[in-house]
């Protein structure tokens, strides 16, 4: 019986194991294509009758090793790396949706994803209904239609720091015969494994904590293998009926629990090609090896900073589920008992100009679009990531106009607090 390793060991060891005389670190297979001795062998690869590599747009050994590590961390049966987190969310939806379909999603999601679902997918004929994740099950149920194909949410919302009630969302999704897709970027599988709470598919922007050092842009889609596509075959013809572009092959019949993952690679990657470079996957692999250590420090530092902000008279409000007064405290204790992440949402007493002045007064903390980095970073979403949204849309997306997103890094927490304090003294 194969030993089941814990998360810290999986971060370091999963996905790639060197054989006798091989490099201990994952090699970068920086090649577009792979040689075979006869054409029949390559033909079998193209027909999905044999596993192997022939073109990096579909599969690459470096990419696959890193995907396998993330699948192990999440407890999934398979994973596919993408060129960005945005690509991961698009592929996760588009793998089961087509023109004329509909999805339901929490409104408290990253601004780029909000725009992807509400604007861009609409141009492809896929409609989206946004719901409050704090609404009752009956209210969320009312958003479903006969052509609804998925329910979506974020474990910890970006930038509002709300915590998703995964079990509630899974219950609603499964009642309607559709999968629950959860973006687990902020929590990472170190602090939450959504599959254990009923989620079916998980996505990540690997650009964030998984990398941890702002060296590569990437994403991943992980399948639990738990959703029974054939039980709802009429909803998912792309998985449950023959694909004429592969000689009539039916993915879930041919590949079982790997059907969703295989279709994503063989069809979507074949046609759309949003792959990461092997060099980027190598950099991601380096970050993953210390993920469990970094997340613990991020959470420890963020708890201190959240408590400081909560007690400061110049701060109007703070959202961080580690605070007993936070709206998401109970959900945080349930789903994230070992810590959530390093991201804090808060607002200052004053107006938008007050927030800008405070940010501009920071000396060590970086004003950047990025988040979930080893360095402490800050952003004003209404002026930056969500500036395409109106004030009404901002509020619908759970983003107050005065919201500041502070991503607490792994520096010495006293230095982080000193910088926040001196900037507060300027307002």
Image: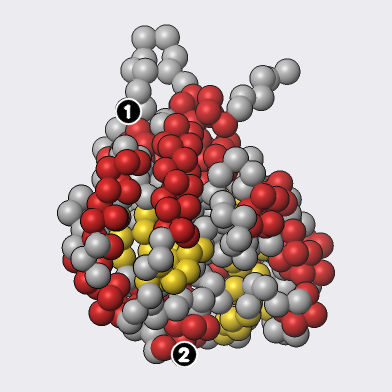
Q: Quadrant of the C terminus?
A: bottom left
Image quadrant in which you'd find residue 412: top left
Tell me if residue 126 comes above or below residue 258 in the rendering: below
Tell me if residue 15 comes above or below residue 416 in the rendering: above
Image coordinates of residue 35 in percent, x first then y, are 33, 35
Q: Which mark is residue 27?
A: 1
Q: Tag count in the figure?
A: 2
Is residue 378 shown to the viewer in this render?
yes
Image quadrant in which you'd find residue 381: bottom left
Q: Secondary structure at mark 2?
A: helix
241 horizontally vs 316: left or right: right
Q: Secondary structure at mark 1?
A: loop
79 horizontally vs 66: left or right: right
What residue appears at the point 31 percent right and 65 percent down from the top-left corner?
379
323 horizontally vs 414: left or right: right
Judging by the rendered image, the residue that carries numbered circle 2 is: 392
Is residue 269 shown to the viewer in this render?
no
């Amino acid at each position: 019986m194969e030993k089941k390793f814990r998360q810290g060991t999986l971060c370091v060891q999963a996905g790639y194991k060197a054989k006798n005389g091989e490099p201990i670190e994952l090699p970068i297979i920086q090649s577009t294509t792979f040689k075979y001795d006869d054409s029949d062998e390559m033909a079998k690869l193209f027909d999905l009758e044999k596993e192997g590599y022939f073109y990096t747009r579909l599969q690459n050994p470096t990419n696959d090793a890193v995907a396998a590590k993330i699948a192990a961390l999440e407890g999934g049966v398979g994973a596919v790396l993408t060129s960005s987190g945005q690509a991961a969310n698009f592929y996760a939806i588009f793998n089961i949706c087509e023109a004329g379909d509909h999805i339901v999603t929490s409104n408290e999601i990253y601004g780029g994803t909000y725009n992807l679902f509400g604007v861009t997918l609409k141009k492809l004929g896929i409609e989206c209904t946004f719901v409050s994740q704090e609404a009752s099950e009956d209210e969320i149920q009312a958003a479903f239609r006969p052509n609804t194909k998925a329910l979506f949410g974020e474990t910890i919302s970006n930038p509002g720091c709300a915590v998703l009630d995964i079990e509630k969302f899974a219950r609603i999704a499964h009642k309607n015969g559709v999968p629950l897709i959860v973006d687990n970027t902020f929590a990472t599988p170190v602090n939450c494994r959504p599959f254990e709470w009923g989620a079916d598919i998980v996505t990540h922007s690997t650009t964030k904590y998984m990398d941890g050092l702002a060296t590569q842009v990437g994403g991943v889609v992980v399948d639990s293998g738990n959703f029974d596509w054939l039980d709802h075959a009429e909803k998912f013809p792309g998985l449950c009926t023959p694909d004429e572009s592969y000689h009539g092959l039916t993915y879930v019949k041919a590949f079982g629990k790997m059907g969703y993952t295989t279709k994503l690679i063989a069809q979507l990657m074949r046609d759309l090609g949003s792959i990461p470079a092997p060099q980027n996957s190598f950099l991601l692999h380096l970050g993953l090896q210390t993920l469990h250590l970094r997340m613990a420090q991020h959470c420890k530092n963020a708890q201190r900073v959240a408590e400081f902000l909560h007690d400061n008279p110049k701060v109007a409000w703070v959202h961080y589920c580690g605070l007993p007064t936070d709206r998401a405290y109970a959900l945080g204790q349930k789903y994230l008992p070992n810590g959530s992440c390093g991201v804090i949402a808060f607002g200052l007493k004053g107006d938008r100009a007050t927030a800008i002045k405070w940010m501009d007064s920071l000396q060590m903390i970086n004003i950047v679009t990025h988040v979930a980095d080893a360095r402490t970073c800050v952003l004003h979403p209404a002026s930056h990531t969500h500036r395409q949204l109106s004030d009404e849309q901002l509020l619908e997306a759970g983003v107050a106009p005065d919201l500041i997103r502070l991503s607490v890094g792994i520096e010495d927490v006293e230095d982080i607090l000193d910088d926040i304090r001196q900037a507060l003294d300027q307002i």
